[in-house]
Image (tube, rainbow, N blue to C red):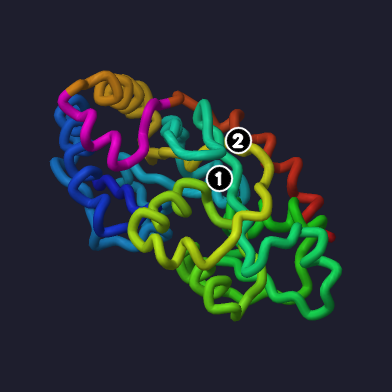
Amino acid sequence: MSIAVLAMYPFAHLRDAYDRLWSAVSTRVDGAPESLDRSIDVHDSWLRDDLLLGQTCGWPLMTRLASRVHVVGAFDHAVGFASGGRYRSVLIAGAPRSVGEWRSMPGCVVAANSDESLSGWVSLCWAWGGPPPNVLATGSHLESVRAVAERRASLASIDAVTFEFIAQQDPVLASLVHVVGHGPSVPSLPLVTSFADRVGPLRDAFRAVIDDPGLAGARSILRIRGFVPFDLTDYASLSDLAHRLRG
């Protein structure tokens, strides 16, 4: 038995669309589970030997997962600041001031979901010019947006796709923050597997569901317009950002 976990965008209004997408993929891959597993923590799923398909963040992929998983590819998302399977994080603030202006303010607090997050931490360090001195750890992009909206933090860096979904789910919350910049262009969240021999069949399956007109509605809800068969080497450039973390 194997498992499939697609939980990096855990919004309730996306569940049915993800289920339809995976159902179509699973019928095209021998031995695939019929349904997505939502009982497993997404971070724990990355280290499972029975992970047929998962989705992780580019930073932990390069820092601790490269020897444990095989990259299948990434979705090309139809959102602002995303193209060709790459994206730029959205820098949001409580007032329309540039990152440089916030950086010059003593005691400025930034919100970050996790220090393992490419979009929430590494991209923020890139824009800030190093690790910000005053950080509020929030645990999720949604909580980072709330922290900025409630003025508990002044600045945060949010995955562009996540910000789109938050704006759909809670437009009032999104209206309380200002987009003041963007992070570097990086590959989108990698789809991974523990099984080297499943990379090819999974890529073929995702190419097929991207072209399936019967799944146009699900793809639209998920903002998926394409699939890019990335390899681990396509994420190697992320190591070039490491010096930003050292300040």
Does the segment drawn in magenta span residue 217?
A: yes
Instruction: For marks 2 and 1, give the CA distance.
Output: 7 Å
Rendered location of residue 19, percent (x, y): 19, 44
* Region of the chain picked out in magenta, as a range: 214-227
Quarter of the rendering containing residue 171: bottom left
Q: Which residue is mark 2?
A: 235
- Position of the N terminus, as image quadrant, is top left
| Mark 2 vs 1: CB contact within 8 A | yes
**Mark 1: few, some, or many residues within 10 Å (few <14, many ≥20)?**
many
Q: Return the residue nearer the eye: 186 or 59.
A: 186
Q: Residue at x 42, y 52 (%)?
A: 46
Quarter occupied by the C terminus: bottom right
The main secondary structure of the magenta stretch is: helix
Residue drawn at the location 49% of the way across and 72% of the way down: 146
Q: Please, what is the three-letter code of the amino acid marked with disc 2? A: Tyr
Question: Of the residues shown, which amino acid type is indicated by label 1?
Answer: Gly
The percent coordinates of residue 228 (x first, y second) are 45, 25
Give 149 or 162, whichever is nearer the viewer: 149
Is 3 included in the stretch rendered in magenta?
Answer: no
Quarter location, residue 211: top left
